[in-house]
Amino acid sequence: MTKRPQKHNAPAAALGVLTGALILGGIFFAGNSVLNHKKNPANTIAEAETTASAAATTTTTSAAATTTTTTTTARFPLAATRTAETVTVDDTELVFARNCILLECGGGDTANVLAERSADAKIPPASLTKIMSMLTFFDLCGEDVFEDTIEMDGDAIQAARAELAYVAGFTAGETCKIKDLLYAMMLPSGADAALMLATYASGSEEAFVSEMNRLAGEMGLTGTHFVNCVGLHDDDHYSTAADLSRMMRCALRSDVCRKLMSTREYTTSETEEHPDGIYLQSTTLWRMNGDELESLSRPLHIIGGKTGFTNPAGQCLATWAEDAQGNRWICVVCGSTAQHSMDAVSDTLTLYQLTDKPLDEIARYVLDEDDILDPPPHF
C-alpha cells in the first residue's frame, strides 16, 4: 500500500504593512479543495477551484480615530437560514419523501431554505453517508493523492458482500488507484471502494469513522452521527436532511468533489485483473437527463448528486441544480418510499419547481421513463 502523505496545511499568510496616512494589509490563502488543502496539479482528477478563502483587514489611522474592519470567509458553510418565505411541504401526494429540504445557495457561505419537511428529524442516511466519507477523505489526505495506489483487501470485499452492500467489482489483491476508488464510491456507490479509502486514510474503518464524526462536529452538524463509512443501517448511524444539505454545500466548494458527483460514466484504470478497467455508471444521472427543468421560466439544469437506499431509509437523493447564470440550488429528499427508485427523482423534480412557482401552483412531476438511460445492473 502506498504510504499516505501527511495532512497538508493551508498556505502561509503574507502580510504587508505600509505606514503613513493609509495602512493597507492583506492576508490571502489559496484554497483549492473543500477543506483548503494543497494539491499537485499533475495528479488531480480535475483542475481544482482557486478560491480566496481569507481574512482581509483594512486599517485607517487619523488624528481623530483608528478603525479596523475584518472580513472572514468561514471554513465551512453557515447553517441555512429559514425565512418568512420558507415553505413547509405537507402534501404527501405531492411529495412522497418523509424528509426533504430545498436550498437557494447565496454568495459565499450563506443559503436560504425555500422549502422543507421534517428537515431536522434524525433519519438513516443510507449511502448519502458517502458524501461525508468523501469530505473526510479529502480533509485527511488532500487532493494530491489520486495516482497513489492501494491493494484491495479480500476481507473488506467479503464483509461488504456479507452485508448485501453493493460492490464495484474490484478483486482481492488488485492494486487500484485512489482516483478510481473515489469514482467507484461516488458513482455506483461501491462499498468496497469506501472501505479501502477509509483504510488508506486512517488505517481502519473504525478510525476513519471517528474522523468523520470529528469533522461533523467541526462543521456544526448537530443532528449527525456515524458508525460506518458506507451507510449500512444502524440505530446509532443517523443524520438529517438539513445536515446532509450542508454536507453538499461543503462538497460543492471543491471542483474535485463536483467532478466526482457530476460524472455520468467512468472507466477505471487498466489492471492485471481488469485489463479493460471497470465500467462505472452514476446511479444519480441514469435516473434523469438533467434537463427536466428547462421548461421553467428560469430554467434549471440538474448537475449531479448522490443516491442512497436501505429498506429503513427508503429512497434517498441529494442533488444540485444551476441556472444559466451559475446560481445554485440544493435538494435533499429522504424516505421517498422503499419500492420505487424513481419516486425520489419525482420528489426532487417536484421540489425544484418551487424555485419558480408558489406551492399552490406546482404539481407532482411524473417521469417519462422512456426518456432516461437504461439502468445500471443495480440500484
Image (cartoon, rainbow, N blue to C red):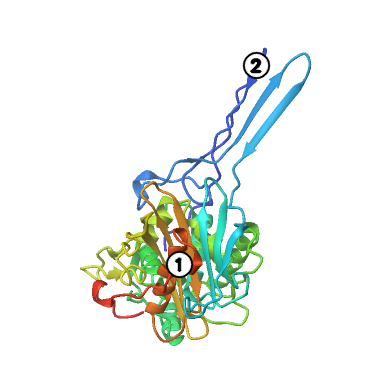
Quadrant of the rendered structure where residue 352 is?
A: bottom left
Question: Total label count?
Answer: 2
Disc 1 packing (10 Å; few <14; some 14–19; many ≥20): few
Residue contact at pointers 2 and 1, CB within 8 angstroms: no
- Seen from this angle, which residue lies furthest left? 276
Label 2 residue SS: strand
Where is residue 357 drawn, in percent x and y? 45, 61
Disc 2 packing (10 Å; few <14; some 14–19; many ≥20): few
Where is residue 267 drawn, in percent x and y? 26, 65
Where is residue 358 drawn, in percent x and y? 49, 63
| Residue occupying the point 28% across, 64% down | 266
| Image quarter (top left, top right, bottom left or bottom right) of the N terminus | bottom left
Q: Which residue is mark 2?
A: 22
| Residue occupying the point 34% across, 74% down | 168
Quadrant of the rendered structure where residue 293 is?
A: bottom left
Where is residue 343 drawn, in percent x and y? 41, 78
Quadrant of the rendered structure where residue 17 is?
A: top right
Label 1 residue SS: helix
Q: Which residue is mark 1?
A: 361
| Residue occupying the point 39% across, 46% down | 325
* Amino acid type shown at disc 1: Glu
- Seen from this angle, which residue lies furthest front? 361
| Image quarter (top left, top right, bottom left or bottom right) of the C terminus | bottom left
**Above or below for 356 versus 74:** below
* Amino acid type shown at disc 2: Leu
For the residues labelled 2 and 1, the Cα–Cα distance comes to 56 Å
**Above or below for 189 versus 221:** below
**Above or below for 214 versus 190:** above
